[in-house]
Image: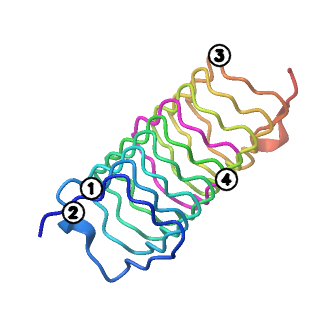
């Protein structure tokens, strides 16, 4: 079965695709509106969802591996337990998203909006998060070992219990940022 959902507007309904394997979408769903969609546990792997609006969607436990998600909107979405292996999230909006315990290990997430996102317990090990906005983000217990945060904004972010060994903070804004072990930067 081959079909494409280009610029489809679905926000007036809540769609449950949990029993549907969307792998049958030949190319994905670019610039679609999947606002508040119920996609928990859905296989969305190896597709192009660039520019798609997933705001408020329930994607808990979904498989997004090898998916193109550039410039997609996940504001307020629940992405807990999502498989993000080999994903391109550059320029995406993850503001206010729930990203509990997800793994962005080794990914390039440049210029991404994580404003007020909850990344507690997530792994950003060796990831490039340069130029991203993490204003007021919860990074408690996050593994940032070897991550690159060059030029990112961590104003008001919380990093208590985070592993920041080897992190590149060059040019990073650390205004009122709560660091591990109670250290706080208030140089604004």
131 vs 179, left or right, is left
Name which residue lies at 48% across and 42% down.
125
Q: Which residue matches tag 4?
A: 96
6 vs 10, left or right, is left
Name which residue lies at 35% across and 64% down.
63
Alpha-carbon distance for marks 3 and 4?
24 Å
Q: Which residue matches tag 1?
A: 28
Alpha-carbon distance for marks 4 and 1?
25 Å
Residue range corresponding to the magenta coloring: 96-115
Q: Tell me which label, 2 or 4, sits earlier in the chain.
A: 2
Residue 179, disc = none
Residue 25, disc = 2
In this orientation, which residue lies closer to the viewer: 111 or 149?
Answer: 111
Local crowd size for mark 1, using a 10 Å CA cut-off: few (<14), some (14–19), many (≥20): many
Local crowd size for mark 4, using a 10 Å CA cut-off: few (<14), some (14–19), many (≥20): many
Name which residue lies at 43% across and 72% down.
39
Q: Position of residue 1 (x, y in %)?
A: 11, 70
Residue 171, disc = 3
153 vs 82, left or right, is right
State the SS at label 2: loop
Local crowd size for mark 2, using a 10 Å CA cut-off: few (<14), some (14–19), many (≥20): some
Alpha-carbon distance for marks 1 and 2?
5 Å
Mark in front: 4 vs 1: 1
Alpha-carbon distance for marks 1 and 3?
37 Å
């Amino acid at each position: 079965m081959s079909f494409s959902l280009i610029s489809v507007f679905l926000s007036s309904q809540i769609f449950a695709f949990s029993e549907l394997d969307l792998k049958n979408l030949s190319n994905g769903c670019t610039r679609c509106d999947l606002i508040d969609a119920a996609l928990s546990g859905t296989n969305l792997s190896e597709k192009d969802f660039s520019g798609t609006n997933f705001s408020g969607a329930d994607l808990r436990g979904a498989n997004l591996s090898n998916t193109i998600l550039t410039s997609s909107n996940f504001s307020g979405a629940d992405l807990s337990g999502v498989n993000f292996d080999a994903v391109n999230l550059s320029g995406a909006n993850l503001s206010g998203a729930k990203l509990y315990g997800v793994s962005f290990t080794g990914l390039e997430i440049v210029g991404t909006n994580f404003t007020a996102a909850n990344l507690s317990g997530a792994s950003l090990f060796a990831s490039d998060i340069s130029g991203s906005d993490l204003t007021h983000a919860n990074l408690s217990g996050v593994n940032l070992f070897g991550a690159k945060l060059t030029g990112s904004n961590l104003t008001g972010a919380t990093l208590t219990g985070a592993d920041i060994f080897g992190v590149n903070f060059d040019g990073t804004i650390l205004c009122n940022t709560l660091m591990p072990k109670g250290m706080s930067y208030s140089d604004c």
